[in-house]
Amino acid sequence: MEIDGLVLRVNPYRDYDAMVTVINKRSSFSFLARGVRKIQSKNSFSVLPFAYSHFDLMKTKDGLSLKTGNVIDSHAKLRDSYEGLMMLDFIGEVTSKFIQEKELHKTYNSIQRIIELLENGFDHYTLAIIYLAFILNESGYGWNVKACQKCGQKDDIVAINTSTGGFICRDCFDGQNGAKLSSRLLKIIRYIFMVQPEMYDHIAFEKDECLVVLSLLEEFILTTVEFRLNSLKLLQN
Ligand SMILES: [Zn+2]
């Protein structure tokens, strides 16, 4: 069985082996890669995180196992930069915490686009909040950013409720059911929950703005989804 795909996750297994999860447009699959953690392994470069490779797999009684792997696009530049490594760590953690194994391929277009933009030097803070919003949408935790979540009106939105994840209008805002935000921040939040991968580079936000949005998303994830994301710490420094 031969397939091309992007390495999303590599979990060390036994002394020299690894369990590798790969995604492409249509599917996701995991296989055992024997010996890839030995220095002399000819397959090791093909299973580095976020390498795009061609894999020749065989079926065994325990599942799929790697015969040979050949790198098509190593994305090495990303793993060589601090921002790149941080983003790979962030994407890896967020994706595996929120998305079930059989649904992983649904993240492919978004991740592929982010890799392309990071390699072109596009702002990683903007991409981080876009990806987090994308994952919340995909996992059913997307925020209601189209109208006030209480009364449904579209105008005069003034606040966001970070425990329910939705917009609140001036009439419904009672001072306690959310955090009042500037119209600019509300627009950014609306944008990240609606933008499609081909438009990810439409606009880059200021670092400070992204960090505010990131902490609002983090608060929602901690209180409502009850996940702690370790990779956020590095991004927030
Ligand atoms: Zn309202």
Image (cartoon, rainbow, N blue to C red):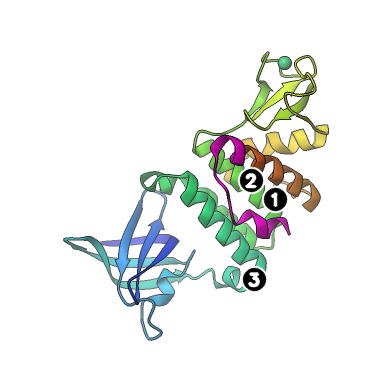
Say if mark 2 contacts mark 1, CB within 8 Å.
yes
Relative to 30, is 145 on the left or the right? right
Tell me if mark 3 has few (under 14), some (14-19) or many (20+) residues whose alpha carbon lies within 10 angstroms of its own: few
* Residue for point 62% across, 65% down: 84
How many badges with numbers are in the image?
3
Mark 2 / mark 3, whichever is N-terminal? 3
* Residue for point 34% across, 76% down: 15
What amino acid is found at the position of numbered circle 2 in the picture? Ile
- The residue wearing badge 2 is 130
* Residue at disc 2, secondary structure: helix
Tell me if mark 2 has few (under 14), some (14-19) or many (20+) residues whose alpha carbon lies within 10 angstroms of its own: many
**Up-down relation of residue 161 to residue 156 (above or below):** below
- Tell me if I can see residue 119 in this picture: no
Quarter, ligand 1: top right
Tell me if mark 1 has few (under 14), some (14-19) or many (20+) residues whose alpha carbon lies within 10 angstroms of its own: many
Tell me how far mark 2 sits from mark 1, CA to CA: 6 Å
Tell which of 159 and 53 is nearer to you.
159
Q: Quadrant of residue 13?
A: bottom left
- The residue wearing badge 1 is 126
- The residue wearing badge 3 is 81
**Label 2 CB, ligand 1: below 8 Å?**
no
Q: Which residues are magenta?
A: 221-237
Tell me how far mark 3 sits from mark 1, CA to CA: 17 Å
* Magenta span contains residue 229: yes
The spot of residue 62 in percent (x, y) is 20, 60
The spot of residue 6 in percent (x, y) is 44, 60
What amino acid is found at the position of numbered circle 1 in the picture? Thr
Mark 3 / mark 1, whichever is N-terminal? 3
